[in-house]
Image: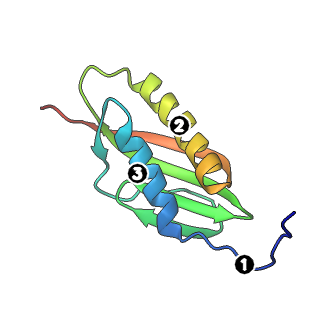
Amino acid sequence: MSQALSGRITIAPQVLTTVVAQTALAMEGVRGLGARPSHITGARGRKAVAAGVEAVVADNTVTISLIVDVAPGVNMMALAAALQQEIAHNIEHILGMQVARVDVTIGDVVFP
């Protein structure tokens, strides 16, 4: 039987934005991330910001805001809901953190 070790575990803020970005880009219908960072109003905690993504961590709980560009003809409400679910799932299962909220903004429609 193994004994639990004590010590500190730190996940770099960029890991959060990378997981969110890669999850979003893997979704069918997403053509890219917004050019500017997203913005979460009123959230307090450690922030991680990347193009199209902002994550705020407080007490092992993450609040995420995401801006995506989508393909024409995509059901935007269904895609945004799927993004919310998949991002929350990946953050919880890959990083072991709770997700308080995932805000998705459709920033643009990108034509081929």
Amino acid at dot 1: Arg
**Secondary structure found at label 2:** helix
Amino acid at dot 2: Glu
Quarter of the image for the N terminus: give it.
bottom right
Q: Earlier in the sequence, mark 2 or mark 3?
A: 3
**Secondary structure found at label 3:** helix
Which percent across, then down, holds residue 65? 50, 50
Foreground of the two, 38 or 62: 62
Q: Are circles 1 and 3 on residues that touch, CB within 8 Å?
A: no
Amino acid at dot 3: Ala
Which percent across, then down, holds residue 7? 76, 80
Q: CA distance from mark 1 to mark 3?
A: 26 Å
Dot 1 surroundings within 10 Å: few (below 14), some, or many (20 or more)? Answer: few
Foreground of the two, 71 or 87: 87
**Secondary structure found at label 1:** loop
Q: Residue at x 63, y 60 (%)?
A: 43
Which percent across, then down, holds residue 104? 47, 41
Q: Is residue 92 left or right of residue 82?
A: right
Q: Residue at x 84, y 70 (%)?
A: 4
Q: Could you say which disc has been placed on residue 8 in the image? A: 1
Residue 51's place in the image compared with 11, above or below, is above
Quarter of the image for the C terminus: give it.
top left
Dot 3 surroundings within 10 Å: few (below 14), some, or many (20 or more)? Answer: many
**Image quadrant where residue 58 sits:** bottom right
Please tell me whether mark 1 or mark 3 is closer to you in this view. Answer: 1
Q: CA distance from mark 1 to mark 2?
A: 28 Å
Q: Could you say which disc has been placed on residue 21 in the image? A: 3
Q: Residue at x 63, y 73 (%)?
A: 10
Q: Earlier in the sequence, mark 1 or mark 2?
A: 1
Residue occupied by mark 2: 86
> Which of the colour schemes (rainbow, by chain, secondary structure, one colour) is used?
rainbow
Which percent across, then down, holds residue 54? 48, 58
